[in-house]
């Protein structure tokens, strides 16, 4: 069952979808007992109706209470400027979601995990590193958005690109102080031709967010310039070692340009930890293509059952 919910994150009301397993509220006493729960964070630019909602719904079928929500400044959640990507607030959003679940009757507060998709994979790690209420961490196509802005998704970006972005962000802040209003930059190419020219990763992002494949009217298509300097100094995996001995699972596609980010992150993590590759999948394939999502969900289900429920997957 999907229920619309709201909760507070640093003074802003966030909108979420709470998924509860069928029978969780039936007359069966065992069915109504508090369950393990999972917070599911969306990719940068995404909304709860896209990849995070898909994973939340699928994991609820496996018996977990799950929560997919829109980050502050995005989707149906509060916050201006609209579309702002603020890593510090995104981490706070995850902790606020854990707080929300912790006081729900249907949730066992001692058994809460986090799943981050894409950029939220990079936010889930620091959230868990400093919040001991989070008992297990998993990611799908994890991305360190800070590293992506600094070095590019594949790590080969010319350093001048970031310097140009920071110059533009500084100018935008000054212009706003002069009363000229907030300005933003597009995060996707305007056409399929331009998207294909940007390579596989750029094209797949454009196809997912800007075509009938998965586009949504509330997903972010432009980002305020004031996001750039916030993102540029963010280091998603710096403190991943603080999560141990709580378990970490990182799911990647074998063809994903971002896969090395998860490999490098786990090299800095303590045990227990695991990298799980899905053959043939790219970064964005794991957002919605069932031939890749299904094995990811199977792996995630077993991971969370072992780490939150203590019962092996059936």
Image (cartoon, rainbow, N blue to C red):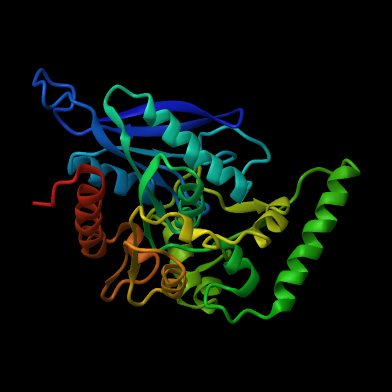
Residue pictured at 52% horizontal, 54% vertical: 44
Q: Is residue 81 left or right of residue 71?
A: right
Question: Can see residue 262?
Answer: yes
Residue pictured at 31% horizontal, 71% vertical: 281
Query: In front: 66, or 197?
Result: 66
Residue 134 drawn above or below residue 24: below
Question: Can see residue 210?
Answer: no
Horizontal and vertical percent position of residue 132: 43, 42
Horizontal and vertical percent position of residue 59: 24, 45
Q: Residue furthest front?
A: 245
In the rendered image, the quadrant that contains the N terminus is: top left
Horizontal and vertical percent position of residue 158: 68, 81
Q: Residue furthest top?
A: 27
Residue pictured at 46% horizontal, 51% vertical: 124
Q: Is residue 86 left or right of residue 260?
A: right
Horizontal and vertical percent position of residue 165: 74, 65
Q: Is residue 103 left or right of residue 309?
A: right
Residue 257 drawn above or below residue 123: below
């Amino acid at each position: 069952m999907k229920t619309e919910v709201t909760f507070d994150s640093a003074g802003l009301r966030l909108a979420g979808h709470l998924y509860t397993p069928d029978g969780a509220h039936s007359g069966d006493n065992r069915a109504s007992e508090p369950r393990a729960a999972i917070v599911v964070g969306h990719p940068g630019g995404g909304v709860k109706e896209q990849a995070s909602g898909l994973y939340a719904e699928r994991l609820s079928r496996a018996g977990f209470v799950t929560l997919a929500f829109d980050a502050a400044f995005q989707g149906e959640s509060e916050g201006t400027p609209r579309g702002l990507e603020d890593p510090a607030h995104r981490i706070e959003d995850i902790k606020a979601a854990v707080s929300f679940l912790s006081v729900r009757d249907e949730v066992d507060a001692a058994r809460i995990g986090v799943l981050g998709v894409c950029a939220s994979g990079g936010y889930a790690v620091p959230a868990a590193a400093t919040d001991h209420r989070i008992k297990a961490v998993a990611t799908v196509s994890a991305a360190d958005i800070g590293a992506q802005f600094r070095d590019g998704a594949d790590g080969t970006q010319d350093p001048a690109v970031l310097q140009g972005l920071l110059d533009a962000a500084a100018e935008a802040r000054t212009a706003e102080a002069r009363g000229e209003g907030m300005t933003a930059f597009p995060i996707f190419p305007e056409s399929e031709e331009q998207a294909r020219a940007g390579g596989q990763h750029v094209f797949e992002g454009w196809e997912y967010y800007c075509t009938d494949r998965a586009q949504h009217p509330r997903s972010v298509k432009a980002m305020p310039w004031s996001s750039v300097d916030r993102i540029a100094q963010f280091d998603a995996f710096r403190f991943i070692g603080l999560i141990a001995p709580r378990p970490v699972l990182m799911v990647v596609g074998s063809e994903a340009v971002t896969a090395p980010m998860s490999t490098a992150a786990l090299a800095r993590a303590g045990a227990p930890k695991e990298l799980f590759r899905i053959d043939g999948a790219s970064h964005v394939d794991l957002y919605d293509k069932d031939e890749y999502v299904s094995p990811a969900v199977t792996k995630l289900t077993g991971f969370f059952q072992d780490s939150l429920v203590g019962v092996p997957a059936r």
